[in-house]
Image (spheres, rainbow, N blue to C red):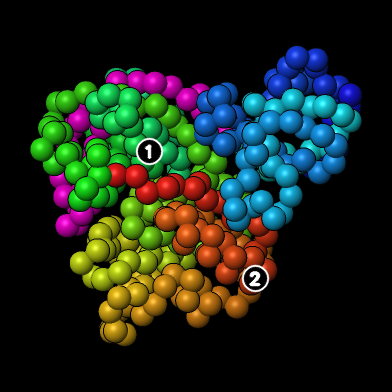
Amino acid sequence: MDILIHPINQTVRAIPGKTLLETLLDNTVPISHSCLSGRCGTCRCKVVDGKVTGPSAAEGRLAQHGQYVLACQSYVETDCVIEIPEVDEIVTHPTKTLKAEVVAFDSLAHDVRRLRLKPKKPLSYSPGQFANLTFWAEDGTRSYSMAGVMEDESLEFHIRIVPDGRVTSLLDNAIKVGDSIKLNGPLGASYLRRNNADPMLCVATGTGLAPILSILRGALETQMPNPIHLIYGARTERDLYGVEALQQLQKQYAHFQYTITLDHVPEQGNYFHGLVTQAIGEYFSDLTGWRIYLAGAPAMVEAASLACTKRGANIDHIYADAFYPSG
Ligand code: FES
C-alpha cells in the first residue's frame, strides 16, 4: 500500500505491522512526535484520501475540517493520501518522566498559584507545551502548561485552585518547598511555530495565560519579528494575574500589544468590556495569513476558533490543546 504525503509529495510504502508514524520515520519523513503513546497529539496527520484506522485526533473545532489521526496509533489499510503539518516546524522532544523539586509555591491571584519545579534532569520543550504533574497517587495527576523557564532553570506552572477540586483544593496545605513531584512531558501540539513572519494573535482566558506567556516569551526573547496581539480575558479585575509581566513585555517590544477583556464588569478605562470573542470581532476584520494561539476553557477555544476562521484564518494555523477543567 502506498502513502502519498502532502505537502512534500513523497510516496512511501506502508510497512506491514508498523504504525503510520513508524513507517514515516523509517522512510525519514520529517514528522513531529513526542510521547509515542497517543497522549501528546504532536504526531497528528490529516487523512486526505484512503483508509487509515486509529483514534481520531480531531476535537470539535477540527472535526468538521476532515479526518485527523494520531500517526503513532494508526495503521494504513489502503493506498492513501495524508497531509503532515508544516515540515519546517518539526518538534521531537522526547516525552520523559522525571522527578522535580518544588522550589517555589506562591499566590498569583485569589485562586491561582505559581508552582516552580526544578527537574532532576533537563527537560527540553517548545513554548506552549504542557506536562502532567502527579502530586501524589496517580489520581492526583493534572495537566499544566509551562509558563516559561526561570533564571534558576526551574519550570513555572500556573494552577487554578478549584474550591471543591479533589487535588487543587488540597494543594495550599500539601505543597511545600523541597517536595518532590513526578513530571511527565512535554506534551501538546499547540507550540510556537517559529519559521514564519506571520502576525500572531494569542487569546487566553484564566490560567490559559501560562502557555501563552511561554509563547510570547519564546517569540519575543528570541527576536522573532512577527507582530503579536494578545487578547486576555477574565471575569473581573480580581481574576486577572500576570498583567505586570505583560506590561513589561509591551515596554520592551514595540511589536507586542495586548488587550484585556472583562466580561463581568461595566466598560471602564483600560479594559474592553465583553468576551474575548467580542474583542476579536472588534479589533480584527481580516485574519487571513495570521497564526492564532488559543488557550483556555474548551468552550472559549471553540468559539474563538470559529470567530477566527470566519475572519479568514486558516484552521491549520490555529493552535490549541483542549484542556478540560479538572480540580
Ligand atoms: Fe503520537 Fe504523542 S507521538 S500522540
Quadrant position of residue 124: top left
User: What segment carries the magenta color?
Assistant: 91-119
What residue appears at the point 65 percent right and 39 percent down from the top-left corner? 56
* Residue 255 seen in render: no
Q: Judge left or right: residue 38 versus residue 182.
A: right
What residue appears at the point 42 percent right and 56 percent down from the top-left corner? 297
Quadrant position of residue 150: top left
Q: Judge left or right: residue 164 versus residue 125.
A: left
The residue nearer to you, when weighing 9 against 164, is 164
The residue nearer to you, when weighing 189 against 86, is 189
Instruction: Bin the neighbour count of mark 1 within 10 Å (Cα to Cα): few under 14, some 14-19, many 20 and up.
Output: many
**Quarter placement of the N terminus:** top right
Looking at the picture, how far across and down is residue 154, in whole percent?
A: 27, 33
Amino acid found under the numbered disc labelled 1: Ser
What residue appears at the point 52 percent right and 65 percent down from the top-left corner? 304
SS under mark 2: helix
Q: Is residue 25 magenta?
A: no
Looking at the picture, how far across and down is residue 181, in whole percent?
A: 26, 26
Q: Is most of the magenta stretch helix, strand or loop? A: strand
Looking at the picture, how far across and down is residue 260, in whole percent?
A: 35, 71
Are the residues flagged by discs 2 and 1 in contact, CB closer than 8 Å? no
Q: Judge left or right: residue 278 versus residue 173.
A: right
SS under mark 1: strand
Q: Specify which label sits upstream in the sequence, 2 or 1.
A: 1
The residue nearer to you, when weighing 61 against 233, is 61
The residue carrying mark 1 is 143
Looking at the picture, how far across and down is residue 110, in whole percent?
A: 17, 57
Instruction: Bin the neighbour count of mark 2 within 10 Å (Cα to Cα): few under 14, some 14-19, many 20 and up.
Output: some
* Residue 37 seen in render: yes
What residue appears at the point 77 percent right and 32 percent down from the top-left corner? 52
The residue carrying mark 2 is 310
Amino acid found under the numbered disc labelled 2: Lys
